[in-house]
Image (cartoon, coloured by chain):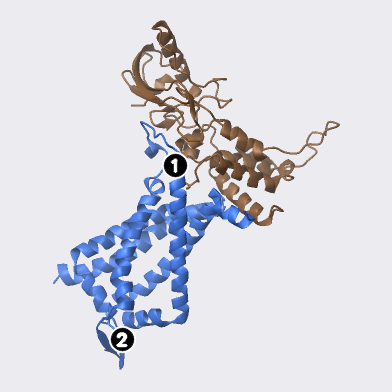
Chain colours: A brown, B blue
Amino acid sequence: MAGNNPNSKPMNLTLKIWRQKNFQSAGKMETYQVKDISPEMSFLEMMDVLNEDLLRQGIDPVAFDHDCREGICGMCSLYINGRAHGPERGTTTCQLHMRKFNDGDTITIEPWRAGPFPVLKDLCVDRSAMDRIQQAGGYISVNTGGVPDANEIPIPKAIADKAFDAATCIQCGACVAACKNGSAMLFVSAKVSQLAMLPQGKVERKTRVENMVAQMDKEGFGACTNIGSCAAECPVGISLENIAMLNREYINATFTSENV
Amino acid sequence: MSWFSKTFSSSIGRKLLVAVTGLFLCSFLVVHLVGNLQLFKGDGGASFNIYSHFMATNPIIRTMEIVLALGFIFHIYEAVVLTRRNKSVRPVAYAYNRPQDNSNWSSRNMGLLGTVILVFLIIHLYNFFWRARFGEPNMIPIEGTEYDDLYSVVVQSFHLWWYVLIYVLGQIALGYHLYHGFSSAFHTLGLNHKKYTPAIQKFGAFFSIVVPAGFAAMPLYFFIKDVVLS
């Protein structure tokens, strides 16, 4: 069971990991053993130990996504023991430490599961569907030319804070992975509300939400039913309020935009 | 595609239709519950029978009956379309999943709860609505006028233990459906703000207990009064 390992003794663990050769092949769960795992290791360091072992045995190492390893980049994923980014709330997998597990535990590790996130290899999935949604409208118009004065456009502190909260989305895809409906609405809503709240985002406000929602549907993501798993599993704490704002923006845009 | 059909075939547009029809159906529940509370009046069913006659003959009520049926049809149709779409999004299921750690049971099982309510609704309509409208209930004189004695149909139905059980189970499903659905509908309509969302959630929880409990009290009252205590 997940818990705080009180002592710092090394742990032996059983890992059940999804192995899949490439995006065309069928995958299956494989079982591996890892020994002498320090509770101070991060989950990804434990995966590194496993891969060194596998290399020594001549087995293809487990492919998994990672980059900054300090919770900022949104590259790491992993569905660990039935939870996106593992059992700890408000963290990415790289911030999850092995002290959350106990000696002798079995840990199940799967890739994000969603049709729009096809598995490329083992635990790596293709998350470019989120990039295409962002490209459909997640931008603002900026004049080129001279450098504008800092703080030229007044923005109330409360609004700046809310927009910044939405802007903390690292596009990791945990919301889609955790959602029963495979919906990407927490991600899309964070991007839409961040820009809709700020004066710089007003130019494309209506076309943005229309285009991003259309792209989200086109990519094949599900429809939100306000379950709230997404916000509960989000490593940066994006609030469900953003989805209400997305709905509000969408209703306003479809009934008042110039796109007939 | 016109903007209108594009909007209402999008994921958010369909959600809006489920939310609006859901809230409309909630308003129906209130009217239905308040009217039927006359069963408890203890006047041998006189006021209930007069009320039933009014509901079956008044032209405004008859028109609203069609609107109500459309409300049910849209709510169910849109929910089925969305559920089918959502189910197809995850072709490979997780080998190990713990959704109970991050969400409520009722919020994840609205389709199942809705199906139980639909089965209940069909049984309920067949037994009361169908018999009242197309059957031939006994007549009863009230203050010199002959009325259909629907009160006796209700009372006799609720003397059957299995019928009471169907009703109680139907209302439990309705309670869980409303527990998520009521506040969720406001969220879908874009209404989420720290000023009023806590109040909507509290009222939703109150509504999801009081309305089904009020309906479930009717079969239980007649079963306990006439069968258990006699």
Residue A239 shows up from this direction? no
Q: Is residue A139 above or below residue B85?
A: above
Q: Earlier along the polypeptide chain: callout 2 or callout 1? A: 1
Say the numbered circle drawn on residue B88.
1
Q: Report which quarter residue B51 is drawn in.
A: bottom left
Residue type of the residue flagged with mark 2: Tyr
Q: Secondary structure at mark 2?
A: strand
Position in image of residue A90 (x %, y %): 50, 31
Label 2 marks a residue whose chain is: B
Position in image of residue B129 (x %, y %): 33, 73
Position in image of residue A254 (x %, y %): 64, 53
Identified at 50% across, 22% down, the residue is A94
Residue that numbered label 2 is attached to: B147
Identified at 39% across, 58% down, the residue is B208
Q: Is residue B220 above or below residue A222?
A: below
Position in image of residue A141 (x %, y %): 76, 39
Q: Report which quarter residue B230 is drawn in.
A: bottom left
Dot 2 and dot 1 within a common chain: yes
Q: Report which quarter residue B77 is drawn in.
A: bottom left
Residue A58 shows up from this direction? yes
Task: Between residue A190 and residue A185, name the one nearer to us.
Answer: A185
Label 1 marks a residue whose chain is: B
Identified at 44% across, 77% down, the residue is B62
Q: Real-space Cα distance between discs 2 and 1?
A: 52 Å
Q: Residue furthest right?
A: A146
Count the numbered circles shown: 2
Q: Is residue B225 rendered to the left or right of residue B143?
A: left
Say the numbered circle drawn on residue A116.
none
Mark 2 Cα-neighbour bin, 10 Å: few <14, some 14–19, many ≥20: some
Residue type of the residue flagged with mark 1: Ser
Q: Residue furthest bottom?
A: B144
Task: Between residue B3 and residue B118, name the one nearer to us.
Answer: B3
